Each structure stands twice: as C-alpha cells, then as structure tokens.
Amino acid sequence: MSAIDIRFACPDWWDRLQRGETPISDQVLDEEMAEIAVALFDKLRVPDIPGQPRMADAAGEWVRDIVRVAFGSIDREAGRRVVGEIFNLVPKKNAKTTNAAALGLVAMQMNTVPNIDGVIIGPTQEVADKCFAQAQAMIEADDWLKKRFRVQEHRKTIIDLHRDPKTGRPLNAKLKVKSFDPAVVTGGIPAFAILDEIHVMAAKSYASRVLRQIRGGMITNPLSLLLMITTQSEEPPVGIFKDELEYARKVRDGVVSSNVRLMPVMYEFPEPFQKDKGEPWKDPRNWSLVLPNLGRSITIDRLIPDFEKAKETSAEELAGWASQHLNIQIGMGHHLSQWVGAGHWNGGTDTTLTLAELMARAEVCTIGIDGGGLDDLLGLSVLGRERSTKRWLSWSRAWAYETVLQRQKQIVEALRTFETAGDLVICSYPGQGIEELVAICVQLRDAGLIPEAGGIGLDNASGVGVIIDALELAGIETDTLKSVSQGYLLTGTIKSVEFKLFDGTFLHADQPLMTWCVGNAKTEPKGNAVVVTKAVSGAAKIDPLMALFNAAQLMSLNPEAARGPSVYERRGMLTV
C-alpha cells in the first residue's frame, strides 16, 4: 500500500472550479479502500428518480471524490483516519440529502467494528425523516442490502446483520437518523456522523452544545468521521455555521495548516467575485461553476424562472434565492436595500484599535448610546477624532439581558459568538449593562476627552431615562448629555459616515458584532432622506450601529475636549 499523503489546502480551488473539477487538491490515498467505497456507492439506487438509476449514472464525480477521500484516507497501519472531518458547501438541489443517505450506507458497509453507532442528523424532524426514507428506499431497491440490513422504521434505525468473519457474530452496527436536538444526541459515541444543513442548525440556541457533544463522543475513536453537508445561510452566517465555514476557508486557503483533519469541499465564488458591484454572479453563464450536479438533479433552465421571479419580488427575496442556489453569502453579494456604508465597512478596519488605543490617539471623543428595550441590545459606541490626522476612530460594545436570549432564539448563537469575541456582554443581573456603560463614560470623562456640552448622545427611546439618571448619579453633568433626533433627521450623519468610510477617514475596530450589525442594516427611502430603522432590519439587531450614528452626529459638530490635553498626554503616554 502506498503511503497516504493528504493535502488539505487547495489554493488553486477557483481554477479547479473553472475547469469543472472538484475543488480539492490531488491526494495520495489507499486506492484499494477508496475504490471499494466508490464501488459500493455506485451500486446504490436513487429511489425517487423514475427507473431508480444507480448512483454510478445519477451522481456526479464530485461526490465520488468525497467518498474516495472519506474512506481512502484510512491509514491501516496506524489505525486512524487521516481525514476525520469533511465540510461540503454545495448549493441547494445538488442531491445533498440523497448523498447523505448514500454515504451513511457506504459507511455501514465499510465498517468492520461490531456494535458501533453511526448517525445522520437533520436540522429538523422533517429533513431527518426524508433522509431516513431515502436510506430505507435504497435498501428496498437492492436485494443484497435487504438481506444485510434490518430496518426499524419506528425507531428510524438501520441495523447491520452482516457477520464478523472472525467471530461469526452479527456486527450489530446501527445507523440512526435523528433530528438536531440535545435530547437525542447527548451521551452518544458515534463512529461516524453526517450533519445535513448545518446552517439551519446554527440558528438553534443549543447548536454549539450539540456539536460539541457529537465531537466529544467521537474523540476517542481515531477512525471516526464527521461529514457536514450544507448550503449557505439565508441570513449572515452566525454561530457554529460561521465558525465551521470560516475555519474551512482558512484550511482550504492554507491559512491554517497544522493539526488539520478537516477536508474542505466548497462550491462558492471567491469573495471579490461575490462583492463585485457588477454582480457577475447574476449571469447564468457563471452558475455552472458552483453547481456540481448540473445536468443531473438540476439544470440552468429550471433555475432561471425562479431567479427572475425573486429579482422582481424584492432584494431580500433575491438575496435568499442566491444564498441557497448559488452559495452567495448574505452581506457579500447584495447591494440593494443595504446601507451604503456596508459596502465600504470591511475596508475601514484598524485591527490595533481598542478602547485604550482609541483614547491614546484621540484629541476628543463623543459617545453614542442606543438604549432599546429588553428585547434589544444596549449599544454604546465611542468615536474619537485622531489628533494627528483628524480621522474618526470608533470602538463599540453592547449588552444583552436574558430576555433577549429567551425571546430572540434565532440570534442566540450569533450573540454567543460576539460574547466570545468580547464585543458583547450577556448580563447576569439587572442593571449590569447600565453600570458598565456608565463606567466607560466616566473613564472618558475623567480622561478629559469628552466635551462638557454635547459629549454623550442618546436616542429618545423608552427606557433611556434610567440611563440618564445613572449617568447623572455618576457625576456626569446634564449639559454633557444630548438627545439625538432619529429617523430622517439622521440622514446627513448617515451619509457622512458613508463618505468617510469611502475616503478612508473613518476607521473602526474590526469587531464581529459591528460587522453583523452593519450587515443587518437596511435602508428605507423617505422622500429625499435615507432612514436606517430597526423595524426594517427586523429581529437582526442594529442597536450598536445606531449608537455609532448618535456619536457621529455629535462629532460632526466639531467639538473640543472638556479640559484640553487628556490625562494620557499629561502623563507623557501619547506619541504623535
């Protein structure tokens, strides 16, 4: 047997897609094991196509490449699987669920270990049931498989009756099809797991816990295999989907190269292609590049009518269609109804910016606060005018109470991601958010960086009175606080921020929370004005962005710091 040589990185992945190849590097595998697995895969029948053709005729070569890597990367001498995880990003209607069922049956037939469990996990009970039905029908369509497997429909379980050639006993391995739920995966020790549509799973409040349970159960088995098959998300990627997506891209691009077990197989356009304002992804001539099953389960002719309908319906409908059928990431490839500044946000990052760094570089600061309610975030943004360049520098933070997590479950995983990054605080007691917000305001006041008049801008939302009381109790003068008019009256400020992002005179701290908020921000025309409102943006929050606009409104008045040079400058801690 040739030594296995796995190359996880595939820097020429875009060239391979353009040549119609699978976007993975050339591999040196255990060819015997790889071809046995492919032969088993090819024999399976597709149960929901007339005539029930075999996979040999119905499936694309890209799926066989995944099968080869999954089962040909076992180092038999070391007793381990070199490729322990596969992340397959592929658009809708490319036979994902059918392939998941087929891969589960191949894994069962390749297994030689008695009493193991394998699982196929769908994001919902409906998807899990469909996947089980596909696997069951594949067995029913093949006389050999009917003899080998016993199907327990009521338990959504397939049992392997094949006998161990050494002991003569049935292997008794089980393939279970489950929905994504802590109650059905906790405590399991799967030998292999196939996750279908992880982008839907990411919206669950318990998603990271369940994935951790799955990986934790597999860690003691060096032959374990985790396969994730998914399309893009219909919302900006968050939670476990965002984490897995970004990690897979780093592996594919060679950014991460040590201790890697994950093989990325990703059908997507490069980021510059998605962000191109000419929107080349809208040209059907480019679609074939990310549709590996084209001509089998999907055709361009069948996609075009839905594309045209989505385009005529709304920008949001088109964005959703493109995310599912072309893997266009929300926030990258869509320009209609999005805040104009979002197109320049990524170009305005300064990764060195922290609150302390901003204070050290600024000659004056303004603070914006967006109070919101118990269903919203409490947002704060500090905006500094840089001493040497007059550029605007921003840093933000937000707080959330448990009520947000309880009532807005679809964004819980996103909030947990921002908490880990340090941009968001999940409050453990009432008043914590206001206390910490006030402490930041006092810190800036004591540094002599905020103006005595109009240094802290607040919206006029309900609940803001509690914040005002807390600020005044902390010794911040009433004149320092200023109500910032919202709605169309903020149009000038919003456009100023847009232009400063465009010309490079606005830099931000590159915080995931703010990138998310900016991606959520939608605009609504009001006559000649442009309004960014929470109502238009829906459950996806924009509170810290509105806080930034409040701070920008005050900074646009060209304020001066309250007490001249800051304490940092007086102590000789500043460099110009």
Image (cartoon, helix red, strand yellow):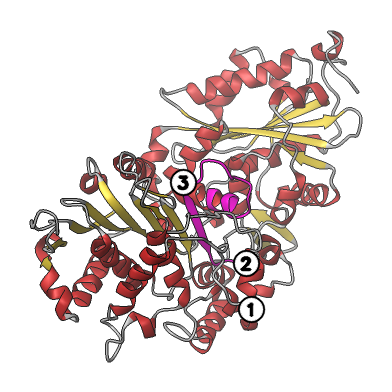
Q: Label for residue 269?
A: 2
- 268 is within the stretch colored magenta: yes
Q: Residue at 48% across / 70% down in the picture?
A: 91
Marks 1, 3: nearer the viewer? 1
**Residue 550, horizontal then vertical, whole percent:** 69, 38
The reply to whether the C-beta atoms of the residues labelled 2 and 3 are less than 8 Å apart is no
CB atoms at circles 1 and 3 under 8 Å apart? no
Q: Nearer the viewer, residue 191 or 484?
A: 191
Rendered image: mark on residue 461: none
Q: In the picture provided, is 300 more to the left or to the right than 381? A: left
Most extreme residue toward the left, as rendered?
A: 169
Which corner quadrant holds the N terminus? bottom left
Q: Quadrant of the C terminus?
A: top right
Of marks 2 and 1, which one's residue comes earlier in the chain? 2
Q: Which amino acid is tagged 1? A: Asn
Mark 2 Cα-neighbour bin, 10 Å: few <14, some 14–19, many ≥20: many
| Residue at 64%, 43% in the rendered image | 545
Query: What amino acid is found at the position of numbered circle 3 in the picture?
Result: Gly
- Taking the magenta stretch, the answer to whether it contains residue 379 is no
For the magenta stretch, what is the residue range?
247-269
Q: Which residue is mark 1?
A: 286
Instruction: Name the residue type under label 2.
Output: Phe
Callout 3 secondary element: helix
Distance between mark 2 and mark 3 Cα atoms? 22 Å
Q: In the displayed structure, does residue 172 sit left or right of residue 248?
A: left
Residues at discs 2 and 1 in contact (Cβ within 8 Å): yes
Q: Position of residue 264 (x, y in %)?
A: 51, 57
